[in-house]
Image (cartoon, grey):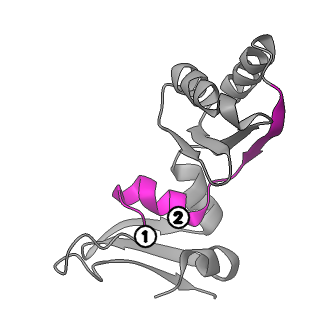
Amino acid sequence: MLYLDEADQLAHDIVVFDHGRVVATGTPDELKAKTGGQVLQVAPADPARMAEVTALMTKLIRGQVGADAKTGVATAQVGDSALVRHVFRELDDRGIELAEFALRKPSMDEVFFTLTGRRSSDENSDEDSGTRELEGSTR
């Protein structure tokens, strides 16, 4: 079993298992493409506006938006690049100055979460422990 960041960097082919069942196979880029596009990261220059940024992103993207208070970054998966432009315009119209506005490919942890509904580090019970894994090949 590989760690997800190692699999992303080193493996050519990846097989994602969830409770002993294969849920996906492919290269890291293929798996990232299968799971819904890219990830938008937005950090307001004023941390006090994080709730406003998160609410706006939730409304416009109509998907789950995560906010990390420690880093001050809100993240959301976006499948349509037109949404990215719309989010940027709305933030600008509201006078929200940005420290960061970036679009990136999803991480393998985000891919695993999308495929299984759980974070790779989740261990909810002894019964579940060790039943989720990702294997990679560097062929």
Q: Is residue 48 above or below residue 86?
A: below
Residue at screen point 60% across, 69% down: 27
Residue at screen point 75% across, 13% down: 94
Dot 1 amino acid type: Ser
Magenta stretch holds residue 109: yes
Q: Please provide the residue range marked out in magenta.
A: 97-119
Distance in Å between CA atoms under marks 2 and 1: 6 Å
Name the residue carrying label 2: 109
> Which of marks 1 and 2 precedes in the sequence?
2
Camera-nearest residue between 32 and 26: 32
Residue at screen point 40% across, 57% down: 115
Mark 1 neighbour density, 10 Å: few (under 14) some (14–19) many (20 or more): some
Dot 2 amino acid type: Asp
Look at the numbered disc 2 and give the secondary structure of its residue: helix
Question: Are discs 2 and 1 less than 8 Å apart at CB?
Answer: yes
Q: Is residue 31 above or below residue 22?
A: above
Camera-nearest residue between 128 and 44: 44
Name the residue carrying label 1: 120
Residue at screen point 53% across, 83% down: 136
Q: Position of residue 22 (x, y in %)?
A: 33, 70
